[in-house]
Image: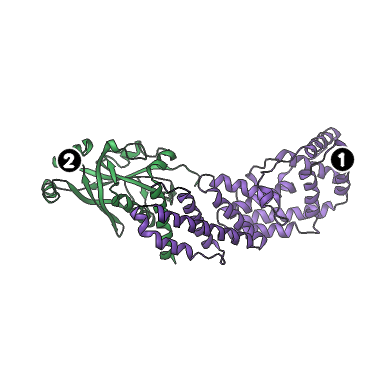
Chain colours: A purple, B green
Amino acid sequence: MLKSHNKKRNIGIIYELLLRHVSACLVEGKNNDAQTCLDILQNRFSVGTEIYKEFRLFNALAKSTVSSTSVAAAVLSEAKSAARRSDPIKLNKEKSILIKDINYKLNDAEFYKRRIPEYRTYGSIQTLLNSWRAHDESDLTKTVKHETQIVDHLLSEKKYPSDLSEISTPDADTLVVKILTEKFNEKYKDKLNDSQKDIIKAYVFSIAENNDSKIKKMLSSLKEDVMSKMLDLEKKTDNDTLLEKIDDVKASLENLSTDEINDSTMSRYLVASQLSDAIGGEIDE
Amino acid sequence: MNKNLRLLTEWTALSYTKDQIKESRDRNDGKIHLKGVLQKSDTLNQNGRIYPRAILERELRNYQKFIRENRALGECDHPDTSVVELKNASHIVRDANMEGDTVYGIIELLDTPSGKILQSLVESGVTLGISSRGVGTTRREGDNQVVNEDFQLICFDMVSEPSTPGAFMMSEGKDVNSSDLDSFFTKSDKINRIFNEILSWEDSE
């Protein structure tokens, strides 16, 4: 009989939960906690581990889209063979260490409580991988039901936000981007303008990819834009309070560095973006 | 910080004597100017709230533009809205400055219908208080509520003395309509607020 599904040993769910933990920590400014979680991901999902092999297999079933039932059946058959080649004892041991890392190093009571939208599909995939690996054919009805569900999933079109392709890079998993974007937008939907959200995304990816050329270009362009709007404001406004301060504000903005990218500089650029937004195109006062 | 902005009001007693009122009329071309404490920072107020000094200082800096432009109007009694209705304006703040944790101010009672009611009340020796009206969220720290960074000061209203702490809680705590707030702060107010933030960068360096 197929064993019931254990989400702590579901590699797809655990991976998503780890990513959600990283994104939650980054959004809340808990950079050390985010790094601890990234270290777990790097160590436990490293190439050559059984977890890595199972995760790749899992992803092939969870993320691929195929055009016909016959191709889906072939994918399923290949996945079954691959699952049977894995070392179940080693895999179980690695998963136990991963769970221990999560429980003892992350210190997050909410970790397993976070909602995974594809929970049912992920549950079916893991159940199938487990049963294939164990050569368990005791409950064919359930196996067929799960296999049918996965075939349907393989045939379905996977939907991600349209702007993801623009910010996703080979080094940044689409799923990471998706989760980070969802979490971020949910928390700051009313607090940040679009430009500020773009700046933060670019900043996060500049750190993740260790490449700050894109963010530097973005900040440089923002600085140019806000300085130009300040000149417009200076010409058009007759508000004494603003006119008294405008030179000092321009000087502060002019001094903003585009070379030194850190949290402090970024927060100032976010204010500059807010100013650009507030000044807007028309000076109506 | 996903909470909605809420109306937050705080009461502070204004003390004056009939003689002081008469003297004020004599000195200010017949107008009544009341001097007193408008607000306090880092102090537990009657509603169990604490306003961190940096936040109150920032809001007072932004409020200077209202004072300068003769727009620092207030109402007699707290309405349950975040905007100041001109038809209900009773007084105008002429000066507000911070010394230590205390915000001191000068309030001029206007010759509007509501203002005349206030004039009559103070001349009759009725104890009135000044109450700040603002919007923002709070967070719990121990037994107290601490006002968060998103607080925005709207005005100072003249109100009667609350009989019990939290007497104005009926009208406050209400979710604020963001479009009302948007229309209350002009474009130059919003730009000025950001200017002040940018100018504070120098202080933090």
Residue lying furthest front in this view?
Answer: A235
- The crowd level at tag 2 (other Cα within 10 Å; few <14, some 14-19, many 20+) is many
Number of labels in the image equals 2
The residue located at (19%, 40%) in the rendering is: B111
B26 left or right of A197?
left
Q: Which quadrant would residue A137 be assigned to in this image?
A: top right
Q: Is residue B163 above or below residue A90?
A: above
Residue A42 in the image: state x and y as whole percent.
71, 59
The label shown at residue B119 is: 2
The amino acid type, in three-letter code, at marker 2 is Gln
- Circle 1 crowding by C-alpha within 10 Å: few under 14, some 14–19, many from 20: some
The answer to whether residue A110 is left or right of residue A128 is left
Which residue is label 1 attached to?
A71
The residue most toward the top is A141
Q: Secondary structure at mark 2?
A: helix
From the viewer's side, name the closer residue of A55 and A112.
Answer: A55
